[in-house]
Image (cartoon, helix red, strand yellow):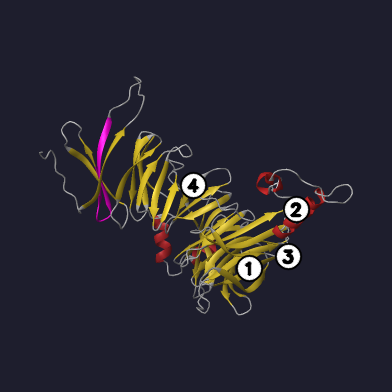
């Protein structure tokens, strides 16, 4: 035997695998293209080393490496879509396969595996059997070619917004529906209908001689939808969800025809309660024939049991619908109708500190960075604001010249915001660099110019990109 080629690696190899990959099938001439031979090596430092092997000379070329995990990858040959593929078992399993003429190495949404092998049977054409801890697992690979893995979690109502707990990695979701019945009332009405349908003409229960499948719900809500109620009726709930186990740890149903529209986590200056949850709700909201509501509220909840449950601290009534909320310098910044208002935490309710009433329509998004506040108006795009703590005042120093019907927004950097409107447009707005420098160098922060204004708006204008 003689050495045909030599390749140095960064760590001792733990596992080796030759993988012959056919680039494509059925070209323009109807013939298959020649296959390539790859040498794959799982190194002890958790890196997968991959290089091309010349089938004639045995020379190694085009070496590539990728870090897969903290454990040394173990390589196994498996069959996927009738072709050979590679299964890499490190801290998490990875699958290397050919999809649309390209080699893809993607992680699997599965637990850590020790050993694996492929098999084929009448019940499972392409299956995998693997050892995970002290258990033997049999599974199949689905949805090849997808970059992201998705898991559907059924909710009680339509999800509106969500935030994640910054420390516990839990999701808090607000759900609401208009013209619907609460879940308990809906199930009670369904039981009454089924009981009435199961009664005979003489009042006795009818004997059903069908299969067990007939006993299942023949009118599932997922297929036929939920029964409708009056348009002025709202149902809403707050859900704490563990995304790793897809389990609901807490579910609070809102009462008295309230619906949740905004949510955020906030850390007030008072560190007694730590991270709190703020939820903005409206009671009796109607859109037709005229927009009206009975009252608006801001609920403050405290996390308990390591963030897995919620406890209501207090509830503050406000004079509008709070559509946007955000933490800002140890306080709660809220958009209530066309008013931008700053609150602090009190013992029995939120304490109003300052506000700005000069926004044109309704505030539907708030982002903050340092001392700047980026406010999105539902019809007039973005407004750039500042807060002067010494004067306890909020003021607008820049706005957009184009009236955008804003539906989504995202903060990019100190001077840039990204937005999307309801007409399908995606755009960026940026404050000119000279204007930004002038505002930061101005000891008043542009307050003097703000008092003067320009064209019934802010003294400075952002540029759209």
**Whole-number angstrom distance, CA of label 3 to CA of label 4:** 40 Å
Image quadrant assignment for residue 318: bottom right
Residue 199 position in % (x across, y down): 83, 50
User: Which sits in the foreground, 315 or 143?
Assistant: 143
Which mark is first along the chain, 2 or 4? 2
When the figure is inspected, residue 65 is found, relative to residue 36, above or below; the finding is below
Residue 143 horizontal side relative to residue 341, left or right: left
Indicate left or right for 174 with 166 as reference. Answer: right
The x and y percentages for residue 12 are 20, 53
Q: For the residue labelled by badge 3, is the local secondary structure a helix, a strand or a loop?
A: loop
Q: Which residue sits at x=28%, y=28%?
A: 34
Q: Quickly name the residue at label 1.
A: 298
Q: Earlier in the sequence, mark 3 or mark 4?
A: 3
- Disc 4 target residue: 427
- Which marked residue is nearer to the observer: mark 2 or mark 1? 2
Q: Earlier in the sequence, mark 4 or mark 1?
A: 1
Q: Residue at x 53, y 73 (%)?
A: 392
Residue visible at 36% across and 35% down in the picture: 83
Overall secondary structure of the magenta stretch?
Answer: strand
Residue at image mark 2: 190
N-terminal of the two: label 3 or label 1?
Answer: 3
Classify mark 4: helix, strand or loop.
Answer: strand
Residue segment shown in magenta:
35-50
**The disc label shown at residue 256, or none:** 3
Of marks 4 and 1, the one in the foreground: 1
Label 2: state its secondary structure. Answer: helix
Q: Earlier in the sequence, mark 2 or mark 1?
A: 2
Q: Secondary structure at mark 1?
A: strand
């Amino acid at each position: 035997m003689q050495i045909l080629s030599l390749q140095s690696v960064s760590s001792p190899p733990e596992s080796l695998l030759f993988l012959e990959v056919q680039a494509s099938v059925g070209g323009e001439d109807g013939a298959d293209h020649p296959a390539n031979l790859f040498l794959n090596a799982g190194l002890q430092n958790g890196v997968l080393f991959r290089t091309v092997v010349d089938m004639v000379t045995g020379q190694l070329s085009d070496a590539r490496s990728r870090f897969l995990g903290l454990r040394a990858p173990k390589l196994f040959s498996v069959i996927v879509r009738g072709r050979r593929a590679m299964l890499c078992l490190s801290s998490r399993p990875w699958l290397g396969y050919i999809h649309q003429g390209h080699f893809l190495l993607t992680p699997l949404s599965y637990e850590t595996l020790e050993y694996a092998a492929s098999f084929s049977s009448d019940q499972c054409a392409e299956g995998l059997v693997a050892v995970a801890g002290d258990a033997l697992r049999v599974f199949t690979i689905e949805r090849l070619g997808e970059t992201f893995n998705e898991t559907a979690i059924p909710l009680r109502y339509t999800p509106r917004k969500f935030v994640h707990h910054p420390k516990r990695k839990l999701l808090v979701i607000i759900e609401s529906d208009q013209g619907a019945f609460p879940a308990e009332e809906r199930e009670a009405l369904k039981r009454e209908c089924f009981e009435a349908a199961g009664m005979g003409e003489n009042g006795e229960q009818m004997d059903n001689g069908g299969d067990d499948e007939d006993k299942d719900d023949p009118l599932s809500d997922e297929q036929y939808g939920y029964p409708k109620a009056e348009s002025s009726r709202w149902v809403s709930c707050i859900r704490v969800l563990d995304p790793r186990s897809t389990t609901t740890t807490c579910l609070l149903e809102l009462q008295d025809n309230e619906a949740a529209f905004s949510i955020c986590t906030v850390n007030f200056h008072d560190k007694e309660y730590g991270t709190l949850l703020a939820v903005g709700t409206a009671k009796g909201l109607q859109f037709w024939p005229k927009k009206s509501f009975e009252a608006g509220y801001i609920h403050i909840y405290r996390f308990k049991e390591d963030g897995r449950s919620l406890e209501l601290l207090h509830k503050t009534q406000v004079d509008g619908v709070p559509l946007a909320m955000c933490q800002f310098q140890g306080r709660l910044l809220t958009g209530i109708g066309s008013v931008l208002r700053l609150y602090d935490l009190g013992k029995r309710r939120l304490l109003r500190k300052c506000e700005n009433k000069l926004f044109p329509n309704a505030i539907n998004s708030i982002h903050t960075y340092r001392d700047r506040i980026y406010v999105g108006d539902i019809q007039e795009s973005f407004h750039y604001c500042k807060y002067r703590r010494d004067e306890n005042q909020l003021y607008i120093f820049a706005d957009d010249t184009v009236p955008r019907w804003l539906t989504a927004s995202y903060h990019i950097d100190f001077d840039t915001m990204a937005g999307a409107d309801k007409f399908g447009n995606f755009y960026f707005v940026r404050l000119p660099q000279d204007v930004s420098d002038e505002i930061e160098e101005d000891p008043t922060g542009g307050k003097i110019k703000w008092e003067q204004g320009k064209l019934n708006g802010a003294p400075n204008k952002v540029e759209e990109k």
